[in-house]
Image (tube, rainbow, N blue to C red):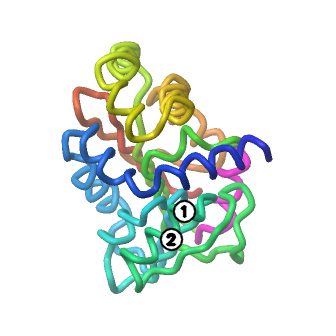
Amino acid sequence: MKHKKITADIFSSVSRHYDAFLNLITFRRIKDWQRTMLKEVEGAKTLLDVGTGTGEVLLQADPQALRVGIDLSLGMLKVARRKCPNCGFVLADAENMPFKNSSFDAITLSLVYRHLYNRYQFLKEAQRVLKPEGRLAILDINKFWLTPLLVFFMKFFIKPLGLILFGRDKWEFFIHSLENSLSEEELKRELESNGFKVIKTQKRLLGIVYIVSAQRI
């Protein structure tokens, strides 16, 4: 619980600058990647975005769908509500979601999965709230041979910007989360051993980023 409170506090404190920073560090590709992720759940009438942050994924999703986002960070949700007033936002834990069984056609996570404290508990909850054959789509950082180079880049070349925007403790948190990212194969193994069938894997930015879609079985 302490870990989750720290995570929530950190993201609340950076909520004002988060979108600008994410655009910068992804070379303005983040929205393209999120749209690619959303194509994997196309047709969903009910969509849950876990760790929704500032609501960017829901803002780009089908406006005809019921769009719901959850996050531990109240600061992030305040930004999200201003950006997407037609979406529903709930302060909630991904490992204990306040929804009935089979509530959603699809779940998305954008740069969130590696931050989860107990990924297996989340996958159990995702199984519960998804409808039969519901889709799960994950956009995240890949852990592979270029990861140490990316960590080095963050520790040195863009560290001054990170310290200005977020401060030392928060910047070190983001670096640590990158070091704890999962490889594509590790993610696939977790999904397939916890009730999901991996449908497709796509890579972006020289393989630094992956988009994995899976189906509840």
Residue holding disc 1: 75
User: Where residue 110 appears, x then y in whole percent?
Assistant: 43, 51
Towards the viewer: 154 or 131: 154
Q: Main secondary structure of the magenta part?
A: helix
Look at 54% across and 50% down and name the residue there. 11
Q: Position of residue 78 (x, y in %)?
A: 50, 71
Question: SS class of the residue under badge 1?
Answer: helix
- Residue 35 image label: none
| x 46%, y 56%: residue | 15
Is residue 198 shown to the viewer in this render?
A: yes
Examine the rendering and report whether any part of residue 181 can be seen: no
Query: How many residues crowd mark 2 within 10 Å: few (<14), some (14–19), many (20+)?
Result: some
- Reply above or below: 34 against 117: below
Residue at the disc numbered 2: 78
* Residue 190 against residue 151 in the figure, above or below: below
Range of magenta residues? 120-131
Horizontal and vertical percent for residue 8? 63, 52
Circles 2 and 1 in contact, beta carbons < 8 Å: yes
77 or 29, which is in the foreground? Answer: 77
> What whole-number distance in Å separates the C-alpha atoms at marks 2 and 1?
5 Å
Q: Secondary structure at mark 2?
A: helix
Residue at image location 59% in from the left, 59% down from the top: 73
